[in-house]
Image (cartoon, grey):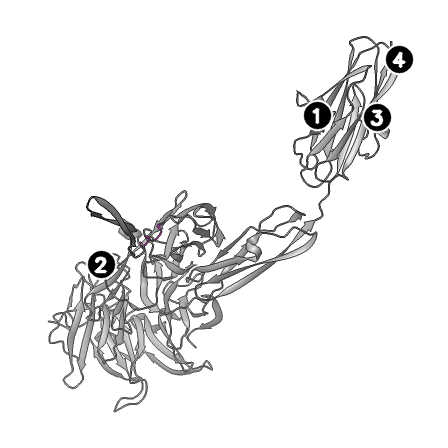
Amino acid sequence: MRLRFTVVLGGLTLLIGMLTVAHPPAIAAPPEHSLTVSGTGVSTYPTFAPDIERYAVAGAAGAQLRVQATTSDPDGQVLVDGVPQGASADVVVTGEPGEEVSVIFDDVDGRVAHSLFLLPDGFPTLEAETVDGAELDPGVVLLTLSRFSQGEPFFETALDRNGVPVHVHEEAETSLDLKRQPNGSLTVQRGSAGSDWLAGAPLVVLDEQWQPTGATHSTVGLVNTDPHDSILLPNGHVILLSYEYRDTPDGQVQDSIAQEVDSDGEVVFEWSTESLVIDEETVKPGDPDYAHVNSVVVMDDGHWLLSFRHFSAVFKVARFDDGGFEAGEVMWRLGGRRSDFAFPDDEWAGPCAQHTASELPNGNILIFDNGGNQLGPDAPTLCVDPADPDQGRVNRPFTRISEYALDEQAMEATLVTAHAPPGRFAYFAGGVEQLPSGHRLVGWAASQQEVATELDDDGLTPLWTLRDTNPTTNQRLFTYRAHLAEVPDAIDPTVTVADPGEILQGTSARLDWQCRDRGGSGLAGCAATADGLLDTSTPGVHGVTVTATDAAGNSVTHETTYVVAPLERAVDAAVRTKGKAWKGVGLVGAAKKQQAATKIIKARKKQVAQVRITNRGNAPDRFLVTGKGATKVVKVVHRSGGRKISGKVTGAGFRTPTLAPGASVTVKVTFKRKRAVKRNQNFPVRVQSTSAASARDAVRVKVKVRK
């Protein structure tokens, strides 16, 4: 800003200078971005916000999806699937489940990428909420979402913290316990067609692209491999669970078995509930599935921690001989009818129908404690009555996340924390795991108010929640358990290029391509040779490449070729008079070889000839038409499209409209006798391409004038 100062002296105004005052430049507001997605039956979540990179789109798989995006920076670019659209995009795209449509804003504020993940049919609309300021543990949340009903699909999925998938796989049969194993492998337990939905589910090893490696693990010498839990140890050993039927004098029962198999497929340890006195342990008498093992953990001292729902107890089982215990002996029971621990401050005297138990770094035991209730008039509850642990049962219709500190000298279990949201009752399945930060990730399973929760390190305060928003409770999907894992994007992006086909030399042509990412990191760039503008300057085979790169650094290059055809300019002129055939069709050359004749006898009698001009080249073209005008004997009028064009034809020439290859235009020539003489006169019509002088042809009309 320039300020001008003056001083008044005795009535004189004196200009004493110009002073420049410097101000810091104004800071421009960042450009505004908008992004909307629409289509028949299409919905999205979460709501668009500039700081949210990924969105889920339901109802779009296999259908048309309209993507509209703008940046307020007039010099900015919006790229959809890697293709520049200008500062505003309005594009219709299609895709398959698991694909991600990319929308990138590239403007004065930098480059911001967003991904639209296309959900499969039936996948729930999820809602995630993070407490302001909360620092969540890094990674994606692995779930197996379903309604746990026969014939219902299971969705193996990995979600970001907005509930948007980075991966979804739909499995028709059983799919449970998707997780990262101690040996680093990704695994899931999948059932086979016709199997019991809770049995016969081998452990499937996945690669970092979420594809089966071909490696599977099943129990050895047993009928079933149970999908509740598994462990792949760093030494190559595998721990699996199994439910095996056994005949007894009182009928058939189902023993719960944990088995360890070495890398050679040999059983190195196996433990079964067969050795137990069923009536002393189970809280569910008369049920063949009297124990129902649902989790196994290798404890810090090498022994096994096993959870049994129908015992309402967690067992520590000796994996090897240790301090008076032989391998396979029960070292202690936590909860149930024969609990070795007292619960001095737990009014419920331990767990009930719990689903997972694990050992914390401090030695405490963390339990997803389901609780129990009578689900029918004749159905027992699974909760042991603290007042009558030998026979009594009580209802406890709520679920809690319990932590116990064990005093193995006094044999007391102190309840350290118990997170029990009001009204929360997961009557089966579910789990809790301690995260590296000390937070806890809960998968609520049959309690459908929430799918998963991350608790603070106090074990009580929710920091993050995930919900299925379906208003109908029994239509919500829930997960067997929830597991947090680091799964870096190891999937290459994809490039799709439309076949350019054959292109005419010298014409303007641009490649039709798109780039997409499927690995969750999002598309970072999509570059085509010469920005996709095809070189058509010379005939022959040419090559072009498109390279896609995602934010994880994965890259793929697609190469394609196209053919540039030599440009051909050619014209064919033909002529005819009334009632006669065309002359000169397919013949290019002198007018006298392409001639039509007509005769004028009476005064004021008219004769008409037609000249047809056809583009015989392989590209659109215009043609210059010239011809002979009137003589002393014959008056000549040229018309085309109803307009009189004689002055142009006999002058600089008449330019035809642009004709596509094979298209034609007709010039009508009318002849009228001016004098009663006997004379023959020739009227040529010449045609030449406006693009190539060598492309020419000519015809003529021979007019016979008689008295």
Decide: marks 1, 3 in contact (CB < 8 A)?
no
The amino acid type of the residue labelled 4 equals Lys
Distance Cα–Cα, label 4 vs label 1? 29 Å
From the image, state whether disc 2 or disc 3 is nearer to you.
Answer: 3
Depicted 558 relative to depicted 627: above or below: below
Q: Label 1 is placed on what type of residue?
A: Lys
The residue carrying pointer 3 sits among few (fewer than 14), some (14 to 19) or many (20 or more) residues within 10 Å by Cα, namely many
The amino acid beneath tag 2 is Leu
Residue highlighted by disc 3: 595
Local crowd at mark 1 within 10 Å, few (<14), some, or many (≥20)?
Answer: some
Circle number at residue 375: 2
Q: Label 4's element?
A: loop
Q: Element at badge 1?
A: helix
Q: Which mark is residue 648?
A: 1
Q: Residue 95: percent from the left, percent from the top?
A: 47, 51
In space, the residues marked 4 and 3 are separated at their CA atoms by 20 Å
Indicate whether residue 462 is drawn in magenta.
no
The quadrant holding residue 332 is: bottom left
Give the CA distance from mark 2 to mark 1. Answer: 97 Å
